[in-house]
Amino acid sequence: MHTIRGFPATWIEHAAKASGFEAELSRRGFLKLSVCALSGLALLGLGDAFGENAPLVILDNATGCLLADPTRCVGCQRCELACTEFNDGRAQPSLARIKIARAVNFGPTGPTGGTAMHGDWGDGLVVQGICRQCPHPVPCATACPQDAITLDPKTSARVVDPAVCVGCRLCQQACPWDMLSFDEEAGVATKCSLCHGNPKCVEACPAAALRYVPWQDLTRDGSPSRATLSVTAPEKAKACLDCHLPAGTKSAK
């Protein structure tokens, strides 16, 4: 079966039909679309989707990011409380932008992890879930049909504008690490904003298991926690062509 960077050609053809490119699927058009489809059909991580040697344009990275040390985490969930108290004015760990509760019992893989299972029912390791403040292309922001995920003016953290978000949850489906939360009361998505440069989760951690450090690309470290299927809007896909065409090709204007 013919493949483009490991993806079956039929997948690209289906993406063409869904994105309105099916009229003329020439060899060049096929190559162009394959790049957009790789981002839209990212069943693997960003590194796997674009390939190790593919062009990657870094635009407006966050100034900092969170680093988590699972060997220090004691599973107390104080970070989750601090997060929601600061951002939402209420103690609601299920809404926290840092994820501890879901990994306490069985780890990121859940109860089917077998001998590799973490958490209280595994080897005792509590693996914290943190937002990686992804570089361009940002999966959650790219998936948002309303462009409701923008940059914090102070830290350039990717944040959700609640006045623009319509609650479609496509950003949740697009995040490979399942790090976006949804406020049922407000009907909008929410994600880590780095607390404007002073993360409250870091302050609250009694075990020094969290650190706020200068930004680094964490998207290639570890594996995504789940498979994702994010469909990129055609107009956004077209805008990506100049940066993400295979080497040696040019997009048609």
Image (cartoon, rainbow, N blue to C red):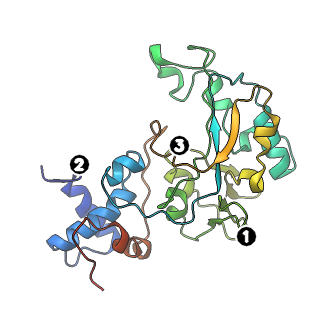
How far apart marks 3 and 1 lie (CA) works out to 25 Å
Mark found first going from the N terminus, 1 or 2: 2
How far apart marks 1 and 2 lie (CA) works out to 40 Å
Mark found first going from the N terminus, 2 or 3: 2
- Is 12 placed left or right of 140 in the picture? left
Label 2 element class: loop
| Amino acid found under the numbered disc labelled 1 | Ala
Label 1 element class: loop
Q: Which mark is residue 6?
A: 2
Residue at point 25%, 60% (across, down): 12
Crowd around label 2: few <14 · some 14–19 · many ≥20 (10 Å) = few
Closest to the camera, between mark 3 and mark 1, is 3
The residue singled out by tag 1 in the image is: 163
Residue 67 in the image, given as x and y percentages of width and height = 63, 39
The residue singled out by tag 3 in the image is: 177
Residue at point 53%, 26% (across, down): 110
Q: Quadrant of the C terminus?
A: bottom left
Label 3 element class: loop
Q: Is 149 situated above or below 86?
A: below
| Amino acid found under the numbered disc labelled 2 | Gly
Residue at point 76%, 30% (across, down): 77
